[in-house]
């Protein structure tokens, strides 16, 4: 980074508050009391992010008389569900390309189920009056290097051959810059219906309210500490009591699973985000972006960006930081060197916004697995179900995961549970220091590929053959 650019990027961060923009909303609800003593229920849901909230809500929709308890270690939506970019995608497979590589024979089914899932989220937003700034504006994957233009074309042609190109449009340089003006954009692939933009924390808080209205009992500041079998049911110990339940659904994702054998399938990755101050009308006009789509560039180390309801630009991604040993720490929620890098990249993308300042800068951990998309399973003779590994694309896919968990707990054979994606597991990560070394080498190789026309080295080709990977 040139010294002048670095100084300019640093100045833009001088007033940035080190807190998630979304969680500062004045509509944030107060915390509910912690669980004390013993509670009994039909279904216990562990985790108050999207995964747990959708599970509790759908459980009550399926069986209104079912007694459902949800426990959350802090407050509903405080972790990844309140810190993400607010991209709610139809994809269940972390994008078309990942799905095509891993489940080509059932990708048409997965895409159909994903579209149905996003439609159901949109319907729930209306049915429960979830005030979460939901806008089904779509997303554009933009090419910023010549080789990415050809990669997007190949992706479009693959979708067309499978009959999945409805709503997709290839954009040349002029067409993509007519949508959003950046001198770095060389082309794009526009998905007009497959992604919605929303306020992620408001979605979590709205789901909390909807669950309460349906009779779900929610206890906050109540982490699940241990899981034990109790005859025909299960018990979960908490700091001040316990819950005895017939069935348990685990939506803990990045946090260590109460089923210990599941822990080797995921690692935490820290992702970082900036938001600008609200843009003026003149600044907005210089960028265009009248249709408010989400955007993401096509590099291995990619950025995602969108406009908020109050006309800020959210800009995140690129760095994906794995902590040695997978240890979670609040100290890692902030990384000034990444904020500086993101700010410099922002002004490279939008030089017309030179002088704009960032209002918020934050980070948080997401759970990733070696296949980049969710995996599922049961434990304790089918009394416990889990879903994890959403890899940053869980705003929408967690609702599908909730349906899968409820199907599994009910012992039902459904279209969802028959999927290879649901019946298979990703490869587990190796123990340390192998995980640290392997992830580090993969990140270095991905950066080299971005710099060398997308050409993947021997390490990445080997990871591809093994079905392993690591992405920003």
Image: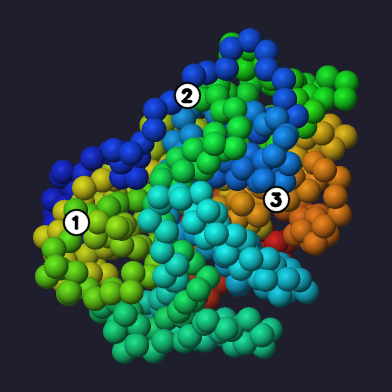
Of residues 12 and 10, the one drawn nearer to the viewer in this rendering: 12
Q: Residues within 10 Å of mark 3 (few under 14, many from 20)?
A: some
Q: Which of marks 1 and 3 is nearer the N terminus?
A: 1
Q: Where is residue 65 in the image (x, y as percent from the top left)?
A: 72, 35
| Left-right relation of 55 to 346 | right
Q: Where is residue 12 in the image (x, y as percent from the top left)?
A: 16, 52
Tag 3 and tag 2, C-beta contact below 8 Å: no
Upstream in the sequence, badge 3 or badge 2?
2
Horizontal relation, residue 223 to residue 143: left or right = right
The numbered mark at residue 106 is none
- Residue 406 seen in this snapshot: yes
Residue at mark 3: 403
Asked if residue 130 is positioned above or below residue 224 in the image, the reply reads: below
Residue that numbered label 2 is attached to? 32
Residue plotted at (69% across, 84% down): 162
- Residue 437 point in image, percent of width and height: 57, 47
Give the image quarter of residue 355: bottom left
- Quick check: 373 left or right of 339? right
Separation of disc 3 and disc 2 at Cα?
A: 26 Å
Q: Is residue 392 visible?
A: no
For the residues labelled 1 and 3, the Cα–Cα distance comes to 38 Å
Residue that label 1 marks:
278
Residue beneath the point at 80% across and 46% down: 408
């Amino acid at each position: 980074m040139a010294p002048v650019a670095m100084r300019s990027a640093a100045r833009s961060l001088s007033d940035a508050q080190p807190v998630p923009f979304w969680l500062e909303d004045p509509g944030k609800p107060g915390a509910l009391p912690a669980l004390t003593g013993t509670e009994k229920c039909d279904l216990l849901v562990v985790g108050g992010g999207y995964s747990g909230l959708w599970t509790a809500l759908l459980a009550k929709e399926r069986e209104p008389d079912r007694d459902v308890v949800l426990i959350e270690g802090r407050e509903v939506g405080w972790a990844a569900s309140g810190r993400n970019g607010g991209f709610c995608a139809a994809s269940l497979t972390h994008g078309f390309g990942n799905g095509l590589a891993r489940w080509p024979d059932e990708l048409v089914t997965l895409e159909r189920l994903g579209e149905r899932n996003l439609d159901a989220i949109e319907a729930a937003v209306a049915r429960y009056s979830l005030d979460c700034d939901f806008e089904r504006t779509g997303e554009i994957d933009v090419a910023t290097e010549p080789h990415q233009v050809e990669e997007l074309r190949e992706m479009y042609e693959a979708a067309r051959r499978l009959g999945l190109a409805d709503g997709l449009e290839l954009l040349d340089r002029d067409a993509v810059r007519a949508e959003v003006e950046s001198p770095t954009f060389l082309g794009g692939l526009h998905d007009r219906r497959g992604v919605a933009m929303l306020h992620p924390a408001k979605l979590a808080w709205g789901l909390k309210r909807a669950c309460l209205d349906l009779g779900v009992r929610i206890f906050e500041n109540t982490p699940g500490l241990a899981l034990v079998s109790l005859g025909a049911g299960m018990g979960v110990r908490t700091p001040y009591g316990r819950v005895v339940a017939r069935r348990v659904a685990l939506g803990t994702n990045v946090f260590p699973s109460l089923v210990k054998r599941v822990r080797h399938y995921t690692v935490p990755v820290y992702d970082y985000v900036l938001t600008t101050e609200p843009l003026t009308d003149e600044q907005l006009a210089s960028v265009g972006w009248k249709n408010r789509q989400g955007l993401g560039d096509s590099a291995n180390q990619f950025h995602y960006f969108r406009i908020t309801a109050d006309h800020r630009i959210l800009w995140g991604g690129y760095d994906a930081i794995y902590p040695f040993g997978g240890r979670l720490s609040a100290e890692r929620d902030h990384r000034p060197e990444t904020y500086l890098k993101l700010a410099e990249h922002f002004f490279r993308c939008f030089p017309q916004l030179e002088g704009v300042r960032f209002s918020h800068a934050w980070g948080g951990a997401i759970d990733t697995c070696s296949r980049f998309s969710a995996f599922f399973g049961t434990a304790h003779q089918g009394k416990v179900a889990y879903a994890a590994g959403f890899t940053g694309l869980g705003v929408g896919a967690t609702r599908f995961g909730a349906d899968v968990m409820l199907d599994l707990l009910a012992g039902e054979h459904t279209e969802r549970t028959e999927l290879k994606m649901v019946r298979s597991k990703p490869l587990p990560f190796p123990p340390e220091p192998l995980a640290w070394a392997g992830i580090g080498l993969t990140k270095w190789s991905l950066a080299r590929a971005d710099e060398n026309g997308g050409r993947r080295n021997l390490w990445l080709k080997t990871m591809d053959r093994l079905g392993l990977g690591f992405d920003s």
